[in-house]
Image (cartoon, coloured by chain):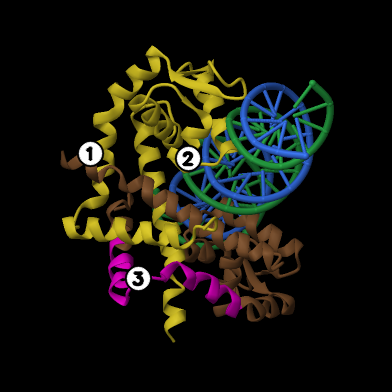
Chain colours: A brown, B yellow, C blue, D green
Amino acid sequence: MLKEKYNQYSFILDRTARRVKQFAQSSFSQGAFDVTIDQWSILKILYKEDAMTQKEIAEKSGKDQPTLTRIVDILIKKRLAQRVEHPQDRRCLQLKLTPEGKQKVEELSPAVKEIRMKAWENLSEDDFENFTRILNTIYTNLNQQV
Amino acid sequence: MLKEKYNQYSFILDRTARRVKQFAQSSFSQGAFDVTIDQWSILKILYKEDAMTQKEIAEKSGKDQPTLTRIVDILIKKRLAQRVEHPQDRRCLQLKLTPEGKQKVEELSPAVKEIRMKAWENLSEDDFENFTRILNTIYTNLNQQV
DNA sequence: CGAAATTAGTTGTCACACTAATAATTGATA
DNA sequence: TATCAATTATTAGTGTGACAACTAATTTCG
């Protein structure tokens, strides 16, 4: 029956997502990048747009606020980012990269791109378009806020 | 540049996989299914093929052995599965569902299928084929054992 | 103005993923 | 047969994810 077949996608999706993460993480470790994948993703967001609130970063990264708090704590402990008080709203904390943080992003970016490209061997441009379209459709299908 | 564009897939993939899991988990919680998604995936494997070693289940589920040990511990605490000594090899433990475990699978299967189908609204049969093909290609591209 | 609702961030708890290290057992081989 | 490498499962440690409950600050509105 149809449903039985469709049912398998969640397993394959989860498995692949984990492998992508694991592959990148082990490349990071081998290269002594000294950050995790998730820490890296936050660094990159901050690099593009310096000074954001944690709330904004959480939205942009798709992580929830508690998770983000913990990742940010680590980034600060590593002296890659710093918390600054928001000029208008004392509830908020703005986040900025430190010079070391900026340097880290610039230093690692090319290597990260290479690592990420490995996944796309034997796949076409069309595949990429379809892939992102389907993922985004699933994502919005399951958006419970709507 | 091309690489910059391709680079985004890992974010979308991770984000979608998490949402799929979260959507299913919150449906499970609402329905008081009393198991997590990952516990469910192990139950289903055991249901199809009673009595497997943890090693076999780990391979089939795509989880590593330490993770599996923990999930199995929980399933046993919930009296849904039981460990049995392997008749030939005393290193192994065979796993079997308890009657309660079997009943749980039978009871929840239809509801789980409905939950899983939600993701595929607005998508075609072709999309499904492409999706699984691309995921599996990525999965094997990143297989570090080869 | 001042109480109530909202918002930003943190902490605690449980579950899962991955690595490395360890224990127990098995099997191969010298 | 005695030794050693391989295999199965577990434990410990770190990081992440989801949820709930909490604090502090701000906004809303009677």
Nearest the viewer among B9 and B24 is B9
At label 1, which amino acid type do we have? Glu
Nearest the viewer among B119 and C3 is B119
Q: Position of residue A69 (x, y in %)?
A: 62, 56
Q: SS at mark 1?
A: helix
Q: Which tag is nearer the camera, tag 1 or tag 2?
A: 2
Q: Is residue B124 visible?
A: no
Q: SS at mark 2?
A: helix
The verdict on a common chain for dots 3 and 2 is no
Q: Residue at x 42, y 75 (%)?
A: B6
Q: Left of A75 or right of it: where is B41?
A: left
Q: Residues within 10 Å of mark 1 (few under 14, many from 20)?
A: few
The verdict on a common chain for dots 1 and 3 is yes
Contact between marks 3 and 2 (CB within 8 A): the answer is no
| Residue furthest bottom as drawn | B1
Q: Which residue is mark 3?
A: A123
Q: Which residue is mark 1?
A: A4
Nearest the viewer among B46 and A106 is B46
Q: Which tag is nearer the camera, tag 1 or tag 3?
A: 3
Q: Which residue is mark 2?
A: B59
Point out the stretch of residues depicted in magenta: A109-134
At label 3, which amino acid type do we have? Leu
Q: Position of residue B118 (x, y in %)?
A: 24, 46
Q: Is residue A134 visible?
A: yes
Q: Position of residue B43 (x, y in %)?
A: 40, 28
Q: Residue at x 47, y 59 (%)?
A: A62
Q: Is residue B64 above or below residue B19?
A: above
Q: Is residue A89 above or below residue B80?
A: below
Q: Residues within 10 Å of mark 2 (few under 14, many from 20)?
A: few
